[in-house]
Image (cartoon, rainbow, N blue to C red):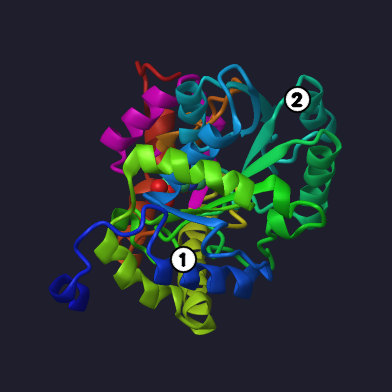
Amino acid sequence: AEVAKTGPHQYAITWGATNFREALARKQKHFSGLDYDPNSEIVVTCGSTEAMMAAMMSITNPGDKVAIFSPFYENYGADTILTGAEPIYIPLVPPDFTFDPEKLEDAFRQGAKALILCNPSNPCGKVFTLQEMTTIADIIKKYDAYIITDEVYEHILYAPHKHIYMAALPGMRERTITCNSLSKTYSITGWRLGYVLASPEIIDRVKKVHDFLTVGAAAPLMEAAVTGLNFGDDYYQELQAHYTHMKQLFVGGLKDLGFTFTDPQGAYYVLMDVSEFGVRDDYKFAEWMTREVGVATVPGSSFFREDVHNLVRFHFAKEDATLQDALNRLESLRKKANAATDVDWR
Ligand SMILES: Cc1ncc(COP(=O)(O)O)c(C=O)c1O
């Protein structure tokens, strides 16, 4: 409210207001231990969505290959189409979403220039372990490649899982283009504030791409959000406690109802297995369920490159009463699904 009166209301520096970049550098140092120079190693973007696009455009040329773990956040597919890059998908295999290092390395043998890593992952809730991160880092270094990380759920974690910063692993700082945003950490998805952290050589290119994509992020919102970037540790602890409560309520309810699902390690999604109902078409099943049960889900196949049609994704960042209402409705799912005849999803 204060900023609305006093401004700034004109363009900020295209790569982000100085005080905002300085606050970002302080926060990043606090959590990752890494120093980023606010002037030469940070670009403020319109959300992580722009950060990812600017990162992709800065390090790939049309025709370059990019490795992507599948399931993946849908935008990565669009980013490769828009940049003209060719995706190579590496399966994260349900139910625990592990990957085969051989398959990952094979993507780089085929000439992949970069890997896109969403950690914690939307949609599968995976938080990559130090061992997995080291395996990935070793391959990236061996093939002299880059890694573009999407760390928007960095602070939404469930104990004992911990967020590991790829850029903080030995030899990875100069190979890692870290994309992140304030959307999830401060519950301000509509403010469109994100950022890219990388070495000066890469940031130089990101600045140019960003300038032509959006000119810059909203000046008054950057000014107002500096307050959030300066919050103490108690804010992040409360955030985790709040999400842990929502997760326990929803996941506990699904468990009581006897469903099969992936208990997330981070982010705020649950993938539920609906194969017990004989689902062949998860899109049609999701439509049916929204209509007949009154709980909306996203069909799992929209996130997978592989032929996976037995999953639906729930989102549990909701008020207790909403989650309880959803669970009450889901109580009727098994009965309704088993009794359903003449449906187009079986
Ligand atoms: C993995 C992931 N990355 C990026 C985004 C978009 O973030 P932003 O609001 O910062 O553009 C989302 C939003 O759901 C997401 O789940």
Q: Amino acid at mark 1?
A: Arg
Dot 1 alpha-carbon crowd within 10 angstroms: few under 14, some 14 to 19, many 20 or more: many
Q: Nearer the viewer, residue 290 or 209?
A: 209
Residue 271 tag number = none
In the rendered image, the quadrant that contains the C terminus is: top left
List the residue tagged with mark 2: 107
The residue located at (51%, 54%) in the rendering is 180
- In this rendering, position of residue 265 left or right of residue 129: left
Element type at mark 1: helix
Give coordinates of residue 211: x percent, y percent: 38, 43
Q: Which residues are magenta?
A: 269-297
The residue located at (78%, 57%) in the rendering is 169
Q: Amino acid at mark 2?
A: Ala
Give coordinates of residue 164: x percent, y percent: 70, 60
The question of residue 270 being in magenta is answered with yes
- In this rendering, position of residue 68 left or right of residue 186: right
List the residue tagged with mark 1: 21
**Vertical placement of residue 291 versus 330, above or below:** above
Element type at mark 2: helix
Q: Nearer the viewer, residue 243 or 251?
A: 243
Q: Are marks 1 and 2 in contact (CB under 8 Å)?
A: no
Give coordinates of residue 73: x percent, y percent: 50, 38
